[in-house]
Amino acid sequence: MATVRQLLDQKGPEIFSVGPEDTVLDAIQKMAENDVGSLIVLDDGHLVGIITERHYARNVFLKGRSSPTTNVKDIMTTRVICARPEQSVEECMAVMTDKGVRHLPVLEYKKVIGIISIGDLVKSIIEDQKFTIEQLEHYISG
């Protein structure tokens, strides 16, 4: 059973962030440049929210707002569900499913050390299952 820390060791700890006063246009451009679906919102180094492509679609585009004039703080989620490094991939998958989120910032001592997505978790689970299958096939074939 893989842990979040192991997942971050494989993925890398790179974190993409914006500030609450940045525009939504800046945030969307940063997501596109880095091929990610969410950004951590940091204020003076502290986690204050998360913004995702879903926030943009539902709270800017569909409401006729303007990306260059809307601030991140106006559409971000401030009640951020986070993961801890010692949590298992399976625990995080259950949390994401239960809470309907696709990204979990990873906190250690109140500091963001990474972020994991539902895609990261699915990839890890598939790799674990593939390894188990290969071991069983090896055992059966002797």
Image (cartoon, rainbow, N blue to C red):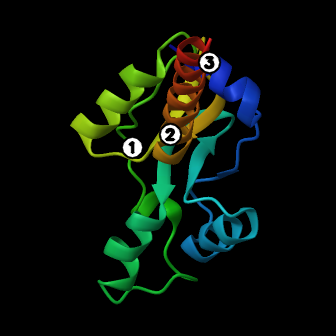
Crowd rating for badge 1 (residues with CA inside 10 Å; few <14, some 14–19, many 20+) = few
Q: Is residue 23 left or right of residue 73?
A: right
* Disc 1 to disc 2, C-alpha distance: 6 Å
Q: Which residue is mark 1?
A: 78
Pick the quarter of the image with the C terminus.
top right
Q: Are marks 3 and 1 in contact (CB under 8 Å)?
A: no
Determine whether 56 is above or below 39 in the image.
Answer: below
The residue positioned 58% from the left and 15% from the top of the image is 85
Q: Earlier in the sequence, mark 2 or mark 3?
A: 2
Q: Amino acid at mark 2?
A: Val
Q: Nearer the viewer, residue 69 or 58?
A: 58
Q: Nearer the viewer, residue 142 or 58?
A: 142
Determine whether 70 is above or below 142 in the image.
Answer: below
Q: Earlier in the sequence, mark 3 or mark 1?
A: 1
Expressed as whole percent of the image width and height from the top left, the position of residue 48 reads 50, 39
The residue positioned 38% from the left and 49% from the top of the image is 77
Q: Which residue is mark 2?
A: 48
Front disc: 2 or 3: 3
Q: Earlier in the sequence, mark 1 or mark 2?
A: 2
Q: Nearer the viewer, residue 37 or 61?
A: 37
Q: Which residue is mark 3?
A: 138
Expressed as whole percent of the image width and height from the top left, the position of residue 115 reads 59, 37
Q: Is residue 68 visible?
A: yes
- Label 1 sits on a secondary structure element that is loop
Front disc: 3 or 1: 3
> How many callouts does the rendering have?
3
Q: Are marks 1 and 2 in contact (CB under 8 Å)?
A: yes
* Disc 2 to disc 3, C-alpha distance: 49 Å
The residue positioned 50% from the left and 28% from the top of the image is 129
Crowd rating for badge 3 (residues with CA inside 10 Å; few <14, some 14–19, many 20+) = few
Expressed as whole percent of the image width and height from the top left, the position of residue 61 reads 39, 84
